[in-house]
Amino acid sequence: MSTSPWIIRQSWEDLIFMHWPVPETDLRPFVPSELELDLYNGMAWIAIVPFHMKDIQFRGLPRIPFGNQLLELNVRTYVTFKGEPGVYFISLDANHSLGVFLARTLFGLRYLNAQIRLDKQGNDLHFSSRRTHYGMSPSHFHARFKISNSIHTYNPGSLMNWLTERYMLWTVRGSSIYKGPIEHKHWELQPAESNVVINEIVDFLPNLIFLQQPITCYSRSLEVYLYPFLKV
């Protein structure tokens, strides 16, 4: 963990993890060559993660009364650099144009503007997104989820623990590699069923991958702390 104090605190709510196994050869072209794909039982993994981010606060400043929440839709995979595991984000769609601009400028993350909607009624959740970023095709994502009432914690070594308990993100800017430490409590996850109606945000991968049902789970709420990015 970073020796510097955290710089941003935020809450992630109504978060869905959807995971599919992917052959390493299919995913390798979309991850910077400086990073190694992290494999579980010989397979790489791709995740789609929709959620609601709120209560965003910069260290030393009060929570601002407006503009401190957004809906986000991440496409991510798992990597290592010199043996240190973490997350690599292929895309991060969000419905907050200022947040998109700042994240792209300050952190070099591939945030993209999108129109996003999240509706929840009881244990049923409906998430839809349409990418609106200038110069890009309007990729759509539309899915419904039914959430179980049971809460699971997963032991170290299990697939779900390996997929979700990640406390570092990696990004490459030009010839430089940066890592961004994050901190939060262990995930408490509820199994969920998913019905994906439209899934265009991963059309860079073979459609056959997404014909199988993803491993899906839900997190109601988690407080997260972000630390300064470090050049390595």
Image: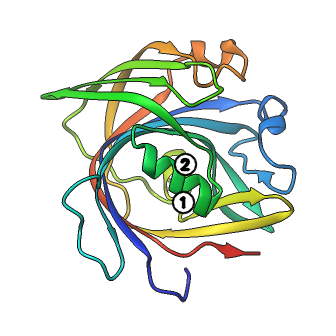
**Residue 14's x, y, as percent?**
28, 41
Q: For mark 2, what is the residue? A: 163
| Label 1: element kind | loop
Q: Which residue is mark 1?
A: 166
Image quadrant where residue 83 sits: bottom right
| Residue 158 appears in the picture as rendered | no
In the image, 54 versus 166, the foreground residue is 54
Residue found at the very far bottom of the displayed protein: 3
The image quadrant that residue 184 belongs to is bottom left
Kind of residue at disc 1: Arg
Task: Name the one closer to the observer, 57 or 32.
Answer: 57
Instruction: Give how far across and how far down residue 42 sits, in percent.
Output: 76, 40
Q: Quadrant of the C terminus?
A: bottom right
Q: Which mark is residue 192?
A: none
Asked if 223 appears above or below 130 in the picture, the reply is below
**Quadrant placement of the N terminus:** bottom right
Residue for point 68% across, 45% down: 40
Callout 2 secondary element: helix
Residue 139 horizontal side relative to residue 64, left or right = right
Q: Name the one closer to the observer, 38 or 138.
A: 138
Q: Residue at x 22, y 40 (%)?
A: 150
CA–CA distance in space, label 1 to label 2? 7 Å
Label 2 near label 1: C-beta < 8 Å? yes
Which residue type does callout 2 highlight?
A: Leu
Q: Nearer the viewer, residue 41 or 171?
A: 171
In-image side of 168 versus 83 (left or right)? left
Decide: few, some or many residues near mark 1? Use Cα within 10 Å; few <14, some 14-19, many ≥20.
some
Taking the spot 76% from the left edge, 58% from the top edge, the residue there is: 172
- Residue 127 quadrant: top left
Q: Position of residue 124 (x, y in %)?
A: 21, 24
Q: Is residue 8 visible?
A: yes
